[in-house]
Amino acid sequence: MHSRRPTTHRRIRLATLAATAGLLLALQAVPSTAAAQQRDPTRAIGQTVADHTSPHYAFERFDVTSRDGQRTWRVHVAVPKAPAPAAGYPALWMLDGNAALVEFDDALLAELAAQPAPHALVFVGYPNDLRIDSQARTRDYTPFEGERPVRGGGTIVGGGGADAMLETIERTIRPEIARRVQTDPARQTLWGHSLAGLFALHALYTRTGAFDTYAAGSPSLWWGDGALLGAPEQRFVTNNAGRHARVLIGLGEGERTRQVAHRDLSDPRVQVHLRRIEAAPPDAAHRLAERLSGVDGLQVSYREFPGLTHGPMFRASLMWTLHAVAGIADHSDTPSHADGVDPTR
């Protein structure tokens, strides 16, 4: 099983050379009619469940600033109004907290609150109205520097702040959460999508005891030329020594098959991004789940979502995680509130 693991950036590049050639042909052949389907990176979150009184959860928020004063995060905490279990509420931590808030509605909060041990909800986001803060998340969720595309084409080098972000979570955000709500230290889940999914895996590799469940939706395993698939994974596999954790890895079928019809292929930034993701094989997430399944102490689940591409996987993987850890119904096939569904219905 371990012989299938990529060991160098060069090996990853060679393994995907043919796929890259096919992608370049696709960039030339597919028209730009998909432009209207592109997600707007400047989309605001609008009103969310945090802006309305709920009979099921009490919402609070606070801001955290780095010591140098250059970085700030906004954290929303949703505390169940039901009495806490003796050990405290289990907790679900969600990265890209602004966007995650959009996916909750009153009906979902009611379902969560009705569980025997309702979860406290922690949304780690940014102090702005952006659904996704691309620049900030690239800085915070990547474990090493890498290239990212910019408007107009080309790339810039950035990122590498994941360890600093983990320190912020452990030393600043977690103590503030504990001041506001009693949570069960043995039932803590970290969820993230895309670059935040990469962050969840990095947290597993470097801080296995910080959470008991690590949920990675569509993890950006291509970041840094696929570096997380090399030495970081190998060190974790070698040194985990039977420490227990649950791992959820989800991927859209359209991601594995590299569907591009929904993208505006005339956009230079999209072209650069599609070339960058070729740094990891299309089935990298599935193969990673298979390898981690062989690690003593890990309980690993992999799920592929039929027909879904990268964007819709945000909601799908979050709803799957809620189903898996909180015991509610699986709402992964329901439409995103980011597409205009009223979250207060």
Image (spheres, helix red, strand yellow):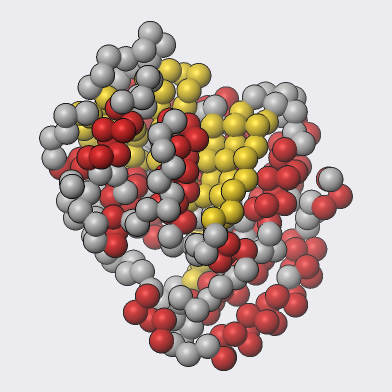
Q: Is residue 107 left or right of residue 196?
A: left
| Rendered location of residue 231, percent (x, y) | 74, 47
Give the image quarter of residue 213. Answer: top right
Q: Residue at x 23, y 22 (%)?
A: 81
Point out the residue furthest to the front here.
329
Quadrant of the rendering where the N terminus is positioned: top right
Compared to residue 91, the image places residue 88 above or below, namely: above
| Rendered location of residue 157, percent (x, y) | 53, 65
Foreground of the two, 252 or 294: 252
Q: Residue at x 68, y 52 (%)?
A: 286
Give the image quarter of residue 64. Answer: top left
| Rendered location of residue 21, percent (x, y) | 70, 82
Q: Is residue 10 visible?
A: no
Compared to residue 39, the image places residue 67 above or below, namely: above
Numbered disc total: 0
Q: Is residue 4 visible?
A: yes
Q: Is residue 200 left or right of residue 136?
A: right
Q: Residue at x 57, y 91 (%)?
A: 29
Compared to residue 259, the image places residue 138 above or below, namely: above
| Rendered location of residue 110, percent (x, y) | 26, 33
Point out the residue furthest to the top here.
86
Give the image quarter of residue 129. Answer: bottom left
Point out the residue furthest to the left here.
53
